Image: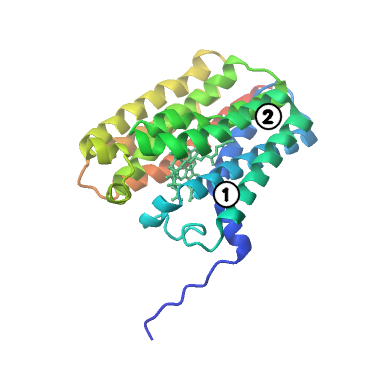
């Protein structure tokens, strides 16, 4: 018998998937590093755990709203069509309630037990991703992710303000790193999935401006990312260990993105660069953390 019977995910697995848990885990790592870099000494572990919980709940709520608002587009793309709401395994009511419950509990937890600034910034990121990006920018302009990327870049700032209760320049530097990294992170995936985005009518850069132009943008943003990652060293927020770890990491980053730019016929290059982008951001924040604690 050739038929493969795919096992349906359980209800819990469906709810879990709505929160884009793998993306949120990486965001939480960035938030945690932001929190640990904020002061020379370790923050209170109880407060830190609560802050991470609040940020996680709000991020997963934002992701669930993204599923809710993008159902029609998710149904049109092979990458997303098996999502629980795209397949109508969960109802509009269930997803709306779940997204609202996660978002509100996350923001209220931060407002009540952490501080109002972190709650406000988290609420702004949540709305930035769920509403501004998903409901508007994503379907309006090929610059959707350069602008919308600000919401996804917020986690280190959220971690930082959770510890300090105030906005500080070094926290903004960490945001800038993710902000500069996002276009190269995403456009390589968009190059690989260009026909799906075209079919769904989503104006991603390779759809509107073509493959060659997008590869050039990836290459330029890769260099912008390199420049921004040097800022923590230039401003003396980080030291020589960070720089030492950064150099081979950036060399790999440039190499992966160079292949995207120059080896247009290498069909594997964009997705290899995409998966490396995730390892890159994790290693980078790991390097910032290591440098911080080796010094103090
Ligand atoms: C607006 C900004 C961003 C856009 C448009 C974007 C886009 C995407 C897309 C389309 C995927 C594929 C998801 C899938 O196949 O289900 C993805 C995966 C991923 N993104 Fe991003 N991303 C953004 C920001 C971020 C940020 C800030 C982080 C973390 C700091 C991040 C971490 C990840 C991770 C870890 C994955 C892999 C998920 C998996 O294993 O399935 N992304 N991103
Ligand atoms: C509070 C806070 C920090 C909020 C940020 C929340 C969050 C989960 C951001 C994720 C960024 C992301 C994966 C964008 C892709 O969306 P897409 O709709 O383009 O991708 P898709 O087609 O895979 O859904």
The answer to whether 47 appears left or right of 217 in the picture is right
Residue displayed at 47% across by 73% down: 6
Q: Give the percent coordinates (x, y) of residue 74.
A: 42, 53
Number of residues whose C-alpha sits closer than 10 Å to that of mark 2, classed few (under 14), some (14–19) or many (20 or more): many
Viewer-nearest residue: 294 or 224: 224
Cα distance in 3D space between marks 2 and 1:
21 Å
The residue at the far front in this view is 93
The reply to whether residue 267 is visible in this rendering is yes
Number of residues whose C-alpha sits closer than 10 Å to that of mark 1, classed few (under 14), some (14–19) or many (20 or more): some
- What residue sits right under mark 1 in the picture? 21
The answer to whether 203 appears left or right of 265 in the picture is right
Q: Is residue 43 above or below residue 7?
A: above
- What residue sits right under mark 2 in the picture? 119
Q: Earlier in the sequence, mark 2 or mark 1?
A: 1
Residue displayed at 51% across by 57% down: 85
Residue displayed at 57% across by 28% down: 288
Colour setup of the view: rainbow
Q: Helix, strand, or loop for circle 2?
A: helix
Q: Give the percent coordinates (x, y) of residue 240.
A: 53, 20
Viewer-side label of 2, 1 = 2
Q: Helix, strand, or loop for circle 1?
A: helix
The answer to whether 275 appears left or right of 128 in the picture is left
Q: Quadrant of residue 117?
A: top right
Which quadrant holds the C terminus? top right
Residue displayed at 29% across by 51% down: 199
Q: Is residue 235 above or below residue 285?
A: above
Which quadrant holds the N terminus? bottom left
Does mark 1 have its CB less than 8 Å from ligand 1?
no
The reply to whether residue 40 is visible in this rendering is no
Q: Give the percent coordinates (x, y) of residue 31.
A: 61, 33
Viewer-nearest residue: 147 or 73: 73
Q: Is residue 243 above or below residue 209?
A: above
């Amino acid at each position: 018998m050739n038929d493969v019977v795919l096992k349906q995910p359980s209800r819990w697995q469906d709810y879990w998937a709505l929160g884009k848990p793998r993306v949120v885990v990486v965001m939480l790592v960035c938030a945690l590093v932001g929190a640990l870099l904020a002061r020379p000494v370790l923050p209170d572990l109880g407060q830190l755990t609560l802050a991470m919980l609040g940020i996680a709940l709000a991020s997963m709520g934002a992701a669930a709203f993204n599923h809710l608002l993008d159902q029609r587009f998710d149904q049109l793309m092979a990458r997303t069509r098996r999502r629980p709401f795209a397949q109508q395994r969960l109802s509009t009511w269930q997803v709306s309630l779940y997204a609202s419950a996660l978002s509100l509990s996350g923001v209220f937890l931060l407002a009540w037990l952490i501080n109002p600034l972190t709650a406000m910034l988290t609420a702004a990121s949540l709305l930035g991703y769920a509403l501004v990006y998903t409901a508007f920018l994503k379907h309006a302009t090929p610059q959707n992710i350069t602008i919308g990327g600000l919401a996804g870049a917020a986690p280190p700032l959220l971690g930082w303000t959770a510890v300090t209760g105030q906005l500080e320049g070094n926290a903004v530097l960490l945001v800038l790193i993710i902000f500069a990294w996002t276009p190269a992170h995403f456009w390589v995936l968009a190059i690989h999935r260009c026909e799906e985005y075209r079919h769904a009518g989503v104006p991603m850069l390779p759809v509107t401006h073509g493959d060659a132009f997008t590869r050039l943008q990836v290459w330029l943003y890769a260099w912008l990312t390199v420049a921004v990652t040097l800022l923590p060293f230039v401003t003396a927020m980080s030291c020589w260990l960070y720089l030492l770890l950064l150099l081979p990491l950036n060399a790999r980053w440039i190499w992966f993105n160079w292949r995207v730019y120059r080896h247009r016929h290498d069909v594997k290059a964009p997705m290899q660069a995409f998966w490396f982008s995730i390892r890159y951001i994790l290693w980078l924040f790991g390097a910032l953390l290591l440098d911080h604690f080796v010094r103090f």
